[in-house]
Image: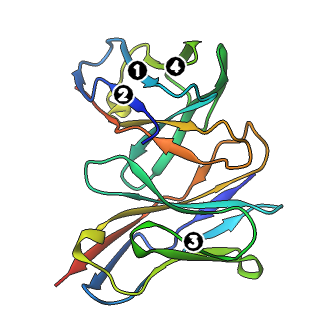
Amino acid sequence: AQSVTQPDIHITVSEGASLELRCNYSYGATPYLFWYVQSPGQGLQLLLKYFSGDTLVQGIKGFEAEFKRSQSSFNLRKPSVHWSDAAEYFCAVGALRENTPLVFGKGTRLSVIA
Amino acid sequence: DAGITQSPRHKVTETGTPVTLRCHQTENHRYMYWYRQDPGHGLRLIHYSYGVKDTDKGEVSDGYSVSRSKTEDFLLTLESATSSQTSVYFCAIKQNDPSTDTQYFGPGTRLTVL
């Protein structure tokens, strides 16, 4: 069965600073990997996804993530954080089998300070 | 926007009463999911459906039942609500293309059980 670990519960960064959110997964085969963002009081919005091919994937809002098979990681990055990026971020892993739902990490809450 | 609506958006009820939450989608997606979101737990899968009348249990299915009598609607029922079921409930769909495995979420229903 798949599992996802997001080691950081809460991260605070200054506006304009770079950001990296960590995600480690466990899955026996090639995973499908996702990052979602949830602004306060809102639903989850897909930021980006990895299925195959180039291990560096670009998403919306200037985010990118890199799949590293050797480290079982899919870390999310942004070179310069904006105050509007303050939100909760969820990493998720899926499998190719049709009836297997995504498994989500517990989330990382990002705070942005001036 | 995957054409997902949830109703009601907010509900306050009393312990022991039945509650039904509705998820409606307009794009004929085969897969639908119900999650609950609680602080410190992230998103946890309650039930999911892979077609009309085809459902399966998720991680936290106790105390919940679901029904899917037509493609566009997936109902979540709390037969006798308890305070531990106070949560935010999210519905999600997965696009019909099996190669994408991407889930999209509704806006959520905030349920308070007094």
Residue B84, image x, y percentages: 37, 33
User: Where is mark 4, residue-wise?
Assistant: B72
Residue B114, image x, y percentages: 22, 26
- Whether labels 1 and 4 belong to a single chain: the reply is yes
- Is residue B60 visible in the rendered image? The answer is no
Nearest to viewer (mark 2 / mark 3):
2
Residue A99, image x, y percentages: 73, 36
Instruction: Kindly state the secondary structure of the residue where label 1 is placed.
Output: strand
Nearest to viewer (mark 4 / mark 2):
4
Residue B43, compared with residue A10, is above or below; it is: above
User: Where is mark 3, residue-wise?
Assistant: A23
CB within 8 Å, label 1 to label 4? no
Instruction: Kindly state the secondary structure of the residue where label 3 is placed.
Output: loop
In the current view of this chain or complex, which residue is farthest to the right? A29
User: Where is mark 2, residue-wise?
Assistant: B6
The span from disc 4 to disc 2 (Cα, nearest Å) is 12 Å
Residue A69, image x, y percentages: 75, 76
For disc 1, the chain is B
Q: Quadrant of the C terminus of chain A?
A: bottom left
Question: First in sequence: mark 1 or mark 2?
Answer: 2
Amino acid type, label 1: Arg
- Whether labels 4 and 2 belong to a single chain: the reply is yes
Q: Is residue B42 left or right of residue B60?
A: left
Residue A18, compared with residue B56, is above or below; it is: below
Amino acid type, label 3: Cys
What residue appears at the point 39 percent right and 14 percent down from the top-left corner?
Answer: B80
